[in-house]
Image (cartoon, rainbow, N blue to C red):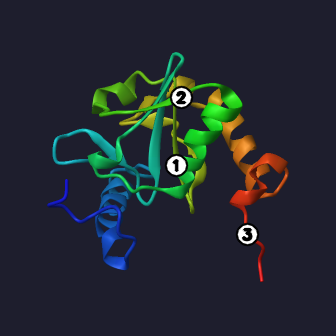
Amino acid sequence: TDSDVPPRVKAGANYQNSRLAMVEARIDGYDSAILLNRFGKVAEGPAACVFLVRGDQVSTPETTAGTLESVTRQTLIQLLRNEVGVDAVEREIDKTEMYVADEMFFCGTGAEIAPVLSVDRYPVGGGRPGHLTNTLRKLYYDVVRGERDQYMEWLSALR
């Protein structure tokens, strides 16, 4: 909520919650963390947005849930719609939904597209990256490498 550290602001101090979550996750034997908002709903990963796949529905937390309005997140929402024919539903996601997800992945500038293979030691989708995650990863890399002409306007030349 707006009374929390605003996720729309990319500033050094804005990543403090992510840093603390990562320390706790590592102490508890996990590779990463998934942050919940003050209402116990899924918000984001450390410096990454979260997508969840169950059946034919792709979901991601609303930006009002305490997640960053990420360029990578928006890119994936558009690629899902344009290339896969699936609309990502922006909605509240309960923690327990992650336990029964078919696929999950983080996305962000640093994470790019990183599959989530387990949550609280429960395997997600058999404990390996799912088909949609792999498909989106390939599409994303094709776009950022300039291999998809229809998305060239998304890129800028290095100087």
Residue 100 in picture, x, y percent from top left: 40, 21
Name the residue located 25 percent from the left edge and 38 percent from the top edge. 41
Classify 156 as above or below 4: below
Q: Nearer the viewer, mark 1 or mark 2?
A: 2
Residue ID for mark 2: 87
Which is nearer the eye, 76 or 126?
Answer: 76
> Mark 2 and mark 1 in contact (Cβ < 8 Å)?
no
Residue 70 visible, this angle: yes
Q: Who comes first in sequence, dot 3 or dot 2?
A: 2
Name the residue located 34 percent from the left edge and 33 percent from the top edge. 91
Q: CA distance from mark 3 to mark 2?
A: 27 Å
Q: Nearer the viewer, mark 1 or mark 3?
A: 3
Relative placement, left or right, of 91 versus 114 is left
Residue ID for mark 1: 73
Which is nearer the eye, 90 or 46?
Answer: 90
Residue 35 visible, this angle: no
Element at badge 3? loop
Q: Amino acid at mark 2?
A: Asp
Identify the image quadrant of residue 158.
bottom right
Residue 119 in picture, x, y percent from top left: 40, 36
Residue 36 in picture, x, y percent from top left: 26, 46
Classify 77 as above or below 152: above
Q: How many marks?
A: 3
